[in-house]
Amino acid sequence: MSDFEYAPAPESKAIANIKKDYGLYINGKFVASHNKKRFETINPANEEVLAKISLADEVDIDKAVKAARSAYVKVWSKLSGKERAKYLFRIARLLQERSREFAVVETLDNGKPIRETRDIDIPLSAAHFFYHAGWADKLEFAGFGEKPKAHGVVAQIIPWNFPLLMLAWKIAPALATGNTVVLKPAETTPLTALLFAEVCQQADLPPGVVNIITGDGSTGAALVKHPDIDKVAFTGSTEVGKLIARSLAVSNTPVTLELGGKGANIVFEDAPIDQAVEGIINGIFFNQGHVCCAGSRLLLQENIHDEFLNKLQKRMSKIRLGDPLDKNTDIGAINSAAQLAKIHELSSSGQAEGADIWSAPCQIPNKGFWFAPTIFKGVTQAHRIAREEIFGPVLSVLTFRTPQEAIEKANNTPFGLSAGIWTDKGSRILWAGNHLKAGVIWANTFNKFDPASPFGGYKESGWGREGGRHGLGAYLKGAK
Amino acid sequence: MSALNLIDGSETSLRRFLQTLPGVDQIGAQERAAMLGTRSIKTTSKKWAIDMAISMIDLTTLEGADTAGKIRSLCSKALRPDPQDASVPHVGAVCVYNDMVGIARKHLDSIGGQSIPVAAVATAFPSGRASRKVKLQDTKDAISLGATEIDMVIDRGAFLSGQLGEVFDEIRAIKEICSDKAHLKVILETGELVTLDNVRKASYLAMLAGADFIKTSTGKVTPAATAPVVLVMLEAVRDFFELSQIRIGVKPAGGIRTTKDAIKQLVLVKEIAGAEWLNPELFRIGASALLNDLLLQRMKLSTGRYSSANYVTVD
Amino acid sequence: MSLDIKKTYKLFIAGAFPRSESGRSYEIRDKKGNFIANPAQASRKDLRDAVLAARNAHSSWSSATAYNRGQILYRIAEIMEGRSEQFVAEIMAMESVSSKQAQVQVRQAIDTWVWYAGWSDKISTIAGSTNPVAGSFFNFTVAEPLGVVGIVAEEKSSLLGVVLGLAPVLAAGNCAVLLASQRRPLSAITLAECLATSDVPAGVVNILTGLSDELTPHLASHMEIDGLDLSGVDSKSAAALRISSVDNLKRVHSFSAEKSPERILSFMEYKTLWHPIGV
């Protein structure tokens, strides 16, 4: 009898109505960019061009900021919280209604598996709008004073790893708290943001409340420097985050930053092993490892090292890499050629520094950007792959002997975004949770997200929190 | 049996061994099972899965109202699930109470179903509440009537009260009677064990005591063969193989009624235990209504149109 | 008539009162130009030692119970009370204010300790939360101390500015390196003498005197410092300090001269923990 290989089960592309080219979304309309410059966005799974995207320059940015200012002054700041809430609820519902379409477009533009866009990215994005809608008319109860005030016009720059979800993390709280927005999606993943602009139109959101400008790094740099911006929110690399922070140091414009990480996933000898294996897999191979809070360092108690790695490697061999639109795909395409080159570079450094590489046996497609799930054994704190964020499906395996040593190694990084703890012992979870310097700690689970749960990092992983009551503070004047 | 070297059969050694097993986080196990439940099985793999699922069914009737007539029609259905389509494989076994074993065996033999084993539930099924003597005799009766598979229940009361040696000894005693005459399936009745930690422990206890199969449920208690329970049992047989080089089979029973349910089971088998378990020697599904749904889906695949209950037999 | 015994104003590092390792001091005078004192002129090496002392003290101070920290903060107020006269005299000398005004400031400073003492075991209640996530998980957020905080104290009211800087930082469970006002450093050093005798563990507070332009750039660029209170820095200098503090993404804040729980939370970090709920 034949083996039970799954036949291809691709989600249909037909639902995705991607236009040939897109303008900038300013003041409620799609408009051509001032310099008429365009760039292409491609499907990283097969390198086919999906659409031509406008590249915004200073003139466009100024237009967008003016639109946002005008909308803030004339409309949005005058609207009651109750009415703002209704717009957000509408947006949440529209996202749910069009979820299949969003999932397909996200998968095409980003390369991540349809299972993830369908089950995580899109539903969570809608949930963020739903959650924050409820805050809009209750801000006086949120603990930021009796009359919390919006900043005004907010500039937001988001990354390519969770394009729509990061948009939701940014726009939902900004609108709920009464700000208007100029948002720039990532250069390689602009499509769902542009689709979201259509949702704003369908929701009858007043023109100028949300403006979406597309472009590259220069567009983002120009946006944060615009003198009429009251607040900046950025998610991306620590390097760019620092550039932004420095450029705003003189004006002292409020900034929130969600930056890089090098999360430690600590497995103690008494862990629920099978779930821990799943947690490690989910921690580093979810979204091709393009996750700032990825558990990219596995810290294994030395006495279970061999047994655990044996299980982990067997599990990794079952990961299904391939067509992101296939409903059975677990790991999709690397988002861009540049990112793939970076992963290759760090991976080579791991080998050059003497770590022991093992990759899951995957058939790599001919076209597109791919990297097989990979682990490095015998990694020490001194290796680059133990210190630098790889942002790809590459796990560094280290060991520890005592709980104290585990914490010491986990904290031995300038980052402080996430950490994982795997043990059946309750008091050890709370002890480790106390000592880990990280903003989000998952115990006996990993990579869980929820709009009610604050997210953000210690140390060089960023400033501020997003989500939950705490995340509202980022968008209110004077809140800490 | 090398696995037995792990323990000496004493209560203390059993307890010590079972304590070395890692815990199961219920939420994590549920998540994994739910994720695998999203696998989309289409076209050729669906066709393969349907036929495989049919050949894995322990076609079961366990009613107080069972009669010779009922058993005979069940056996006919087991051999030729679709009278109009000879390409449909026969099921894995028929499963009946021990007083029906002779009737089933005889009928199967008379219609050309010699290759289909008859399984008997035994040991005071479903509660298991009877004396050891009665349970042993129950098993002997079934085997003497021609059962080549015994589906015994464990003493859940003993398990839950910590008398692991009692449970272990009972399984061993039944196994001794089965010897080389019958395959032993040990029913854990996971709905009464409640926690996944218990499911894992009971799975190992049964495997150490000599089970050829571990089976989820009697079908008389809900919840029965939930995906997380089957997941944990498949992990157990996978890991037991690492320890002993012996492959133990798994049989979910109860609540698997649709093709979709059955295919989800096969996905679990493939992705948790491995493809080696994807055959009726190592995986069975205890069911009755499932067979007709599989047949309907099979017709849909070959004709392209949805079929109707009028086109499958009610036996 | 006997001659006054004048005090030598030294630095406060790791619970000790060293002179600057550089051997330098500088002169401060009152409004009329009368000599007041020669406080130590701390060097960047003194600053480095102070930061190290703060870092070393952080583990035990941050893990002390909030109740214990509250009692210690209250103890500071008790000890200050006994030194009121000295504080008043120093404030009058440095700030050229009346005895009444100086007394009011000392009163406010002591009351500020008492107010923040009470916050130490309440701030987490106010700021923390349990979060109703969609799934079978227990999820909670707690506020934790940031680590080592550099403080440039506001100098208008030189004692109160120091206390407004230190008290919230300590209540949060942080350790501090405080740079006293260049012109008006005496209250800070006398306060250090109170701290040294009021159960504050060595290194939890370190106080430097010296030249602001010389020391603040090192405070801002030091990679072992996690947060900065720039209340005592003018806005032009603050911009440059903010730029160099980006190197390790310090949490940088300036405050008006008021006490508030936000001042505590500014130097706390939110940590969120998830755990499954299952059987």
Image (cartoon, coloured by chain):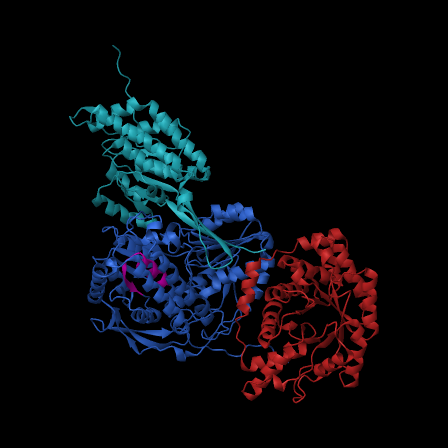
In the displayed structure, A92 sits above or below C271; it is: below
- For the C terminus of chain B, give its image quadrant: bottom right
Residue C138, position as x, y percentages in the image: 50, 53
Measured along the vertical axis of the image, is residue B67 above or below residue A70?
below
Q: Colour of chain B?
A: red
Q: Answer above or below: position of C243 versus B280.
A: above
**Observer-nearest of C121 and A403:** C121
Q: Position of residue B115 (x, y in %)?
A: 75, 81
Residue C195: quadrant of the picture? top left
Q: Is residue A182 on the magenta stretch?
A: yes
Which residue occupies the foreground of this view, C72 or A366?
Answer: C72
Q: Which residues are magenta?
A: A166-184
Is residue A456 placed above or below B104 in the rendered structure?
above
Residue drawn at 65 percent across, 60 percent down: B199
What quarter of the picture does the N terminus of chain B occupy? Answer: bottom right
Q: Can see residue C17?
A: no
Image chain in blue: A
Left or right: where does residue B246 sit relative to residue B43? right
Q: Position of residue A319 (x, y in %)?
A: 53, 69
Q: Is residue A174 magenta?
A: yes
Q: What residue do we see at 70% from left, 52% from top?
A: B16
B219 vs B30, left or right, is: right
Asked whether residue B268 is in view, the answer is yes
Taking the view exactly as shown, the residue that stands out farthest to the top is: C1
Picture quadrant where residue C97 is located: top left
Which tint is chain C? Answer: cyan
Counting labels gives 0
At horizontal 71% and vertical 56% (from top left) the residue drawn is: B159
Residue B307, horizontal then vertical, whole percent: 57, 85
Side (left or right) of B160 relative to B47: right
